[in-house]
Amino acid sequence: MTALFAQLLNGLDKGAAYALIALGLTLVFGTLGVVNFAHGALFMLGAFCAVTFRYLLTIEVVTTDPTQLSPWGQPLQVRTPIIQDWLGDWGAVIVDYSVPLSVLLAIPVMAAIGIAMERGLIRHFYKRTHAEQILVTFGLAIVIGEVVKTFYGPNPYPQPIPSDLRGTADIGAWFGLAPHILTYPIWRLVYLLFSLGVIGGVFAFLRFTTFGMVVRAGMADREAVGFLGIDIDRRFTIVFGLAAAVAGVAGAMYTPLLPPNYNMGMDFLVISFVVVVVGGMGSLPGAVLAGFLLGILQSFASMTEVKTLIPGIDQVIIYLAAVAVLLLRPRGLLGRRGVMES
Amino acid sequence: MNTLIRQSGLSRLFDLSRRDVITLLIFAAVVLTMPIWLAPLGAAYPGLMQKFAIYAIFAIGFNILFGLTGYLSFGHAAFLGVGSYTAVWSFKLLTMDILPAILFAIVVSGVFALVIGYFSLRRSGIYFSILTLAFAQMCYSLAYSVLTPITQGETGLLVARGDPRVLDTMLGVQAQTGGVPQPSMLGTTITGYTGFYVCAVVLILAFYVSQKIFASPFGMALRGIKSNQTRMVYTGFNTKPYMLAAFVISGMFAGLAGGLLAATDPIAGAERMRWTESGNVVLMTILGGVGTVIGPVIGAWVIKYFENIFSAINTGTLNEWFAFLPDGLQGVFVTVLSKFVGEGWHLTLGLLFVLIVVFLPGGLLEGSQRLAARFRRKKQPQRRELRQMEAGE
């Protein structure tokens, strides 16, 4: 029983990443009607925001310390990150917390990239077919991946977890179980809470702000909102930026769990499309629900017992789920009747 | 009597319009003389020309699905990979002769296409693309994990000396002395140029089949499905078998290409099934011109040619080229351009992808036709005709 519960927890953090990416994909599809194959690349770019942030923080200055001598009798050269030089111990803490803090960099950068992408390329494709949208964004995903590769090289960049958040939390003990029966890495817990926060934030934004109301109205009937004299295109551009930022922070926070490389976007993209389809094209709650469900499903499928029963199931379970949903309930779990059902 | 049968058979075989026959003959001539006209372009290596022919077959097959029916499959690389694996297994178990290998490659990939197509074709549009992508990803990850006994995972499936090769042993074909056995056809070992000519002949056959399909009532029905499937269904037309047939044929072409890849170089790896390969064949097809007979071939050639040229360029060559510039400027040019060549070829490919879809959705063929039309208009203004042409397209 606890083993099952542990797998459930393990599935949640992966599911959280799927849910965040799928949320952005669905937002873009629901508002702009664009099938964005470059969304996984945005997730990857977010992860590289974390890499860059840490790189910037750890630029070092070399100072000579005349009070200490090296074994050769020279004054000792001390390398300290600039930020530590300026801020002392606070600087060290900031370097330690580079991953969560990189979200602050990722949000504006990714929003800007998203808006630039929409204005520069995507908006010329609203009236084209889905096939052409897929093709152009697919090409864009290749370009983004390759550009990252030229700057960062092909190798993954492991990112450290802040030292306070390493180790595991004894969740079992919180619920009155004996200690060490049910433990869970703290960072995964942080990621889970973080993504729940982001998801809640996005939903609240769409639900309780005037901007969100206009966007929701636009999702329901774009033309009618346009007739009311509202510049819906501009709003949708901002939504694209929002979706990019969500994907970006999802990627940045995920770096300690999976060292980013230029290729990771596509692996996540395929899965998150599956998530979107399972949840129901254009349904935001559906995307979130399906993200968590598929994450958990994948986690259960990678249990040793299941793997010995059906070898290889952990590799294909998500795709099998997608095939099953598409064939049996094409509008997805929470999709509206008649939306993209053909 | 005998002659009569032969005549009718022949006439049915060449039952193409005069225009198609001429195209076929010119095409055959162009393909077979490749070693001559590619020499000045610096691409007359047998290995590269084999790739030209093989990927052209792949693209022709893809075009039968995408060009005629408009269904965008994002998982065609799976069939290419399946074809390669089948061919190599045929080399290992039966014989080093490539004919059974290719035959098996076509049949097995056809069966795969039948299964995948049966499920995927229940949906259309983007759902179809995602379904095919999901199936291809399944094949890819299985080939890397559980199916390692069959696929050899990351190492790739190789032909070894000690393989059983039942047919070869039965027929008393001696294993070549020393080294790994080479694929052969009816006793002739496949080397660079024989390999190319085998591929070239198959390419011409594939082109002919594609012409036949385009000109047939079957092809007409597929086009009808592309332009308005609902209307086709309302007129009492069962579109399902047609779509499935197109999918399977297109999968078999991919399998044939995969088999040829293995026949010219007997190794099969899972990386041939990656989604990037599926993307590549889409790009080849749209670059040349979707829905035209010759377009995909041109697209495949252009991509493979530039891939070869661009990948070969390194910083040294760039430095030579820009040696005439002042040092500072030379450095800038070389640094910037070096990102696009060699290892960075994929960047160029991605950019090409975007540019083609944005500016030239009809591909190179349509582009050249538009250019030609512009020149013709300068000579004699026939606006009305042109407008009709555009409306027709």
Image (cartoon, rainbow, N blue to C red):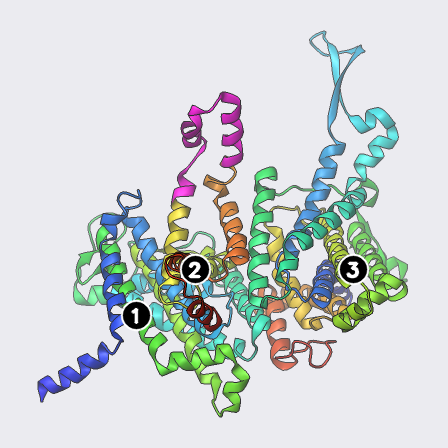
Disc 1 to disc 3, C-alpha distance: 56 Å
**Would residue B276 appear left or right of A251 to someone viewing this image?**
left
Labels 2 and 1 touching (C-beta < 8 A): no
- Are both tags, 1 and 3, on one chain? no
Residue A104, given in percent of the width and then of the height, sits at 81, 44
Give the residue type at disc 3.
Arg
The answer to which image quadrant residue A242 occupies is bottom right
Q: Which mark is residue B117?
A: none
Q: Main secondary structure of the magenta part?
A: helix
Residue closest to the eye, B78 or B183: B78
Coordinates of residue B373 in the picture (x, y in percent): 40, 60
- Badge 3 is on which residue? A235
Residue B370, labelled with which disc?
Answer: 2
| Residue stretch rendered in magenta on the structure | B309-337
Q: Quadrant of the N terminus of chain A?
A: bottom right
Q: Find residue B31 and report its horizontal and vertical position in percent.
A: 26, 57
Q: Is residue A73 above or below residue B245?
A: above
Q: Is residue A293 above or below residue A263?
A: below
Q: Which residue reaches farthest front?
A: B380
Mark 2–mark 1 Cα distance, whole angstroms, equals 41 Å
Residue at the top extreme, as displayed: A73
Residue A157's place in the image compared with B151, above or below, is above
Instruction: Using a 10 Å C-alpha cutoff, classify the residue at mark 2 as few (fewer than 14 neighbours), some (14 to 19) or many (20 or more).
Output: some
From the viewer's perspective, tell me whether residue B209 is left or right of residue A329: left
| Residue located at (36% from left, 60% from top) | B297
Q: Is residue B316 magenta?
A: yes
Please state which of the two labelled residues, at mark 1 or mark 3, is closer to the viewer.
Answer: 3
The amino acid on which the numbered mark 2 sits, given as a three-letter code, is Arg
The three-letter amino acid code for the residue at tag 1 is: Leu
**Magenta segment includes A119:** no
